[in-house]
Amino acid sequence: MNRRLLAAAVTALVLTAASACGGGGGTEGGAGKTTLRMIVNITPNLTEQFWNGLFDRYEAKHPDVTVQLELTGTIEAEAKLRQDLAAGDPPDIAQHVVPTPETAELFVDLSGEPWAAKTPLFDEYAIGGKHYVVGVGEQIQSLVFYNKKAFADAGLDATKIRNIAQFEEAMGKLKKAGLVPLQTAGQWVTGAQFSMLADAGVLTADPDWTVKRKKGGTTFAASGYKRYYELYRSWLEQGFLDKSALGLQYPDGQAAFLKGGSAMYIMGSYFVPAADEAGKSDDIGVFPVPSDGAYPPGQFGNMAQPYTVVAQSKHREAAIDLVEWLVTDEEAIKVQLAADGNLRKGFAYDVSSLGDGVQKVLDEAPTVLVKQGDRQPVQGYADELNKQIQSLFTGASADDVATKLDQWWDSQG
Amino acid sequence: MVGLAGLSADSVRVAARSPGSDRSTPGGRRRRLREAALSAGMLAPAVVVYTVMTIVPVIVALYLSLTDWNGFSSAAFVGLDNYARLFDDPDTTRAAVVTVIVAFFGSVGMLGLGLVYALQLKERNWANSFFRTLAYYPHVISSLILGFLWSAILGTNGAINNTLADLGVGPVGFLFDENLAVITLVGVIVWAGFGFNVVLFVAGLQTVPRELVEAAQIDGASRRQINRRIVIPMIAPVVTVAMVLNLVGLIKVYDIVVSLTDGGPAGATETIAYVILTRSFAGTDVGFATAQAVGLMMASAALSVVVTALRNRQDRAAAS
């Protein structure tokens, strides 16, 4: 069965379902109007209302264009795109879908667009020298947010915490003061926090670590990561992390920190809007994760609001114009940055003191460590890491984690 | 009255050759053709829907499972590589074990609890109707919602652990202890699903002849003996149906895992369906995910056949 036959079969299915449900629709709006269909990811910060408000601005300036949201609902943006393509009903633009070498051909190469090269992390996301995705800003993630009152009560000065020993000493004092030193949670949070910490150390020292791992030139067991598994395990044994935190969901862990039940919280810059929303920004400070190497270490980061133009789009030029507006129009950029607590050099917007603190960390960071393009780990690594780090809570040793991660990585074709 | 047995073979043959029904007459042929066309016309929508919605997807799935398709680009035929990978992939192996545990203990729990509950509520009165409804109530709520609900009750910050904390007792790891999380998952599944078994069993119990029970009572049999020797054997076919439905339903359990534990801690509650949907498909490993799904489908079918065959054998042995 070839791909066309497959697409026909899937299309038949989808059409049957659509006709049964009375569905229908098209990409053309009123007379002379172009309707651009765009997959958007809905999050607590980026709501449907936010997207509609953003595109109202575009439509006001471009009366010949209507932007139609393709909401992801409960599925990932990438799954939604896959669904649309399989149904032979491609959208024009996809937000929150980052191309990989395997999927790059599905997107328009924006290398020739003069405006694209000026967008954040443009080069870091290149695949084989081509540029399929552009973003509005940057998210940085190797940040330690801390409860100012807890630090004051424990007699700690956050500005003096630079290396792992100082970090551990601070956690010891905070524990003695009756606080949970470091807040974590279950779901994806455990592994993500570990990455935010360990990647800053290991990848600042060796930015090509992932490339080497892919080629078999190194392993988890024989690299700097091993030390971080050991550290994490020892922190659990010393009670710096609460083992029962695995029973918390992401919002619960965040709420526990915001309520002051714990002293520190490793999280990305997108924590700032949550702190602002809770009215706690002035009570919270931020510093880069500690490192035994260069200080400050590089910030593990990624492109904020990534946009791609789908190669099968029937309105390619109009779609490229809209994406250009999204990532270059000053007003559009500020609205998007503010909504999700993202950053971009040269673009200031009204932020809380905590937002200022994060911007300062980014300004002082020697580099933003991006795990994309050639430096992208094998598919599924984040999930597997999360599981293995959680296994430290349930009794696994650092050796177990390193060995299992190596075995898993090698088994992924 | 003359019964059918009283008719001679000749009289039946004569009746079959009566005018209008004779195969050799043009009128008879036309009528049969009309009837056949009508039957085909009435069946056609169902055949089309079944083919398009069931047969075609299964064939497409079988084909996809033999490719390395990532969901986007063109697929290359890789033969049985994906099936070989099923046995090498640590995620699949671990999830298969968890699925078997959940399906077995969940099914046994739902059957046991459902049977006990149904036996207590077999008489018709308002109180029993109320308790039957109560048992069935969780079944009508989305499993996703039930999972979130129990997560809020059993989580580290949940109602139970908060109450325990007020009493100075440390948190119980319903959702953060590897073993307890699996037990919790099974417990919630049993709670959510046993009501359906109750409905089946109560319906089965209504078919048990009262005379048999009354005769046993007159003979001095205890309630326990009546249930064990008469009632339960008589509703055995219903138990078989419930068992198959439970097993097939639990072997693909996904939604309650997502909302209750999200597969954690440390992957301890990841079932096969969870791995297929959250990792393999989401990870653009569609060929492999489809092989996992085909494996799941075959396991489910095999399980149904085995359970039904065992049950039939037991019934035949009991009858002989």
Image: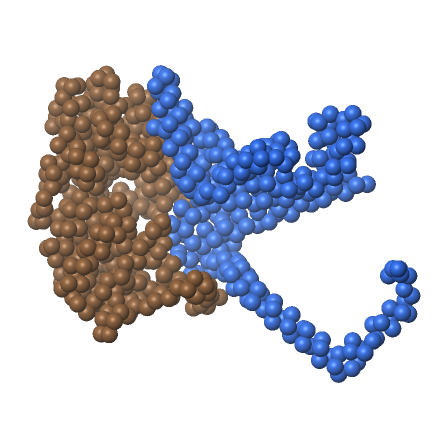
Chain colours: A brown, B blue
Q: Position of residue B131 (x, y in %)?
A: 55, 34
Would you say B121 lies left or right of B266 here?
right
Would you say B294 lies left or right of A53 here?
right
Q: Quadrant of the N terminus of chain B?
A: bottom right
A247 vs B214, nearest the viewer = B214
Question: Measuring 28% from the left and 50% from the top, which residue is drawn there?
Answer: A42
Q: Quadrant of the C terminus of chain B?
A: top right
Residue A125 in sight from this viewpoint = no
- View extreme (bottom): residue: B26
B147 vs A226, nearest the viewer = B147
Q: Position of residue B105 (x, y in %)?
A: 56, 34
- The image quadrant that residue A308 belongs to is bottom left
User: Looking at the picture, does residue A345 appear above or below residue B268?
Assistant: below
User: Looking at the picture, does residue A199 appear above or below residue A235?
Assistant: below
Q: Position of residue B119 (x, y in %)?
A: 64, 33
Residue A265 in sight from this viewpoint = yes
Would you say A306 lies left or right of B253 here?
left
A41 vs B17, nearest the viewer = B17
Question: Measuring 38% from the left and 50% from the top, which residue is drawn there?
Answer: B282
Question: Measuring 40% from the left and 62% from the top, which residue is drawn there?
Answer: A86
- The image quadrant that residue A222 belongs to is top left
A154 vs A397, nearest the viewer = A154
Question: Measuring 44% from the left and 34% from the top, which residue is drawn there?
Answer: B268
User: Looking at the picture, does residue A24 appear above or below residue B106?
Assistant: below
Query: What is the tally of numbered marks visible in this picture?
Result: 0
Q: Position of residue A412 (x, y in %)?
A: 40, 46
